Amino acid sequence: MNTEKKQAEFGSRFGYIMVAAGAAIGLGNIWRFPFLAYRGGGGIFILFYILIAIFMGHPMVEMETAIGRFGRGNVAASFGKVKKKYTFIGIIAVICTTCIDVYYVVVGGWVVKYAVAYITGTDFGVDTRQYFDGFIASSVEPVVYTAILIIVTAFLLFFGITNLVEKVTKFIMPALFVLLLVCGVWAIFSSEGALEGLKYYLVPDFSKFSIKMIADAATQVLFSVGIGWGIFVTLGASLGRDHNIKRDSMWVTICDTSVALLAGFVIIPSAFGAGVDVASGPSLIFVVMTQIFDDLPGGRLIGLLFFVALIFAVLSTLFTIIEIPIKWFEETVKVTHRKATVAVSAIIFVASIFVSLGFGLLSMVKLPWLDVNGIAFYNLYDWLDTFTAYLLLPLGCLLTCFYIVKGWGFNGYGKELTADGRDGTISTLHKVLATVIIPALMILILLNCFGFIK
């Protein structure tokens, strides 16, 4: 029996779009996007981010989805469908996403902890940074919350991404939109100075334009839209021939970009209104936002809604990014989906313990990273983040473009993308994007990663 016959398919177009959008919509949209938008000049960053999402994010979603639907297997097998020698591109994606899983579940566990803290009325104290640092430095509590998150995710994946996960995501994704919208409106009308923050966020200031800003915006699109991970190759393998990939990819990109913009709508005006600077990294939502919520009227309730929204974002992403190595393990080792789910989840959990302890007991463990400025030393979390997000993701996109242009060819790709012409044709612009524009942006990201762009 061939793989294609056994491949389960999504029950509805809406279900697929919600799962695909949810896979890309995660913590990166909610903590990283607002920080980069703030640092990048607000409105000018937003303008270029939207343009890059249209001309890089959307076509990459189309490419990856078409590769998956044609390949009908795990990421590596799908890239190897045309020629076996291209299997390595999918292997890079599996390695990248598994490494992301290892640190993503740790931060996801922190989100669960804070949601529980808001439910139980925990006092974060005057210094929210001290509370946060004390929690993540603990050797036990963060690991427990990480375990809870992995168990819930693995249980839902037992039934396959096109079954229970699809049903759950069809609820949590619309709820995520609503919760973020409520948080943003509440923050704007509850704090003085928030409208000034909204103006900074939405009105472009072209004096703040820079190549560094473009590189940061392009990097964030990799995070926000979820390209280079193997997400859409994996989901595309379960996509029926009746789906219009071009149209569905457009909706996935719109949903994802909307959530990123909504996250900025919540956080930047709130920060302006509270008179605090927007911090970078995970501390943004755990230190800055808890401080802001403490000062807002009804802050406890809005804080709870915010962290529940974050849990939805975490779960919607984990469903797919853990499914990527699970699917590869299942088909490579030839075991059942449930056995693969248990094995991969256990491996990710054990590795995540070391990442979690890297903020406390193993904080002295540092790994080297070489760039144009010399050798830097990062803890386990920061090293994995840099290795995956700034190196493997752009490399994966670069190789995907090469595969489309040289490996598969536009004729073969076009037949799959358009269902043999049923859904239109590949435009000249699309070919230029895959051949020149997207690879150029990936090279820009890599140069930025290694410190060549200031």
Image: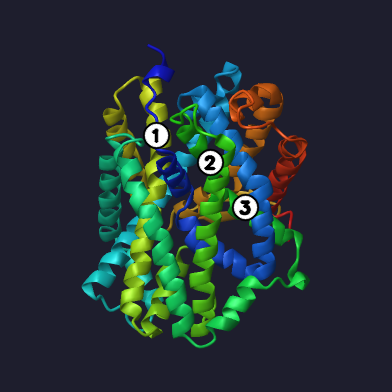
Q: Earlier in the sequence, mark 2 or mark 1?
A: 1
Which residue carries the number 3 mark?
219
Circle 1 packing at 10 Å, graded few (<14), some (14-19), many (20+), is many
Instruction: Judge whether residue 118 can be spotted in this image.
Output: yes
Residue 412, x across and y down, in percent: 65, 21
Q: Which mark is residue 111?
A: none
Describe the colour scheme in one phrase: rainbow
- Say whether residue 172 is left or right of residue 257: left
Circle 2 packing at 10 Å, graded few (<14), some (14-19), many (20+), is some
The kind of residue tagged 3 is Thr
Residue 368, x across and y down, in percent: 56, 49
Most foreground residue, 287 or 25: 25
Residue at image position (55%, 35%) is 245
Give the distance between the C-alpha atoms of the residues marked 2 and 3, in whole angstroms: 23 Å
Q: Which residue appears farthest toward the bottom when viewing the image?
A: 192
The kind of residue tagged 1 is Phe
Residue at image position (68%, 62%) is 47
Q: Which mark is residue 10?
A: 1
Circle 3 packing at 10 Å, graded few (<14), some (14-19), many (20+), is many
Q: Which of pointers 1 and 3 indicates the residue nearer the eye?
A: 1
Most foreground residue, 380 or 44: 44
Q: Quadrant of the N terminus?
A: top left
Q: Quadrant of the C terminus?
A: bottom right
The kind of residue tagged 2 is Asp
Residue 177, x across and y down, in percent: 43, 60
Give the distance between the C-alpha atoms of the residues marked 1 and 3, in whole angstroms: 30 Å
Q: Earlier in the sequence, mark 2 or mark 3?
A: 3
Q: Which of pointers 2 and 3 indicates the residue nearer the eye?
A: 2
Which residue carries the number 2 mark?
248
- Say whether residue 77 is left or right of residue 306: right
Q: Secondary structure at mark 3?
A: helix
Residue 429, x across and y down, in percent: 76, 39
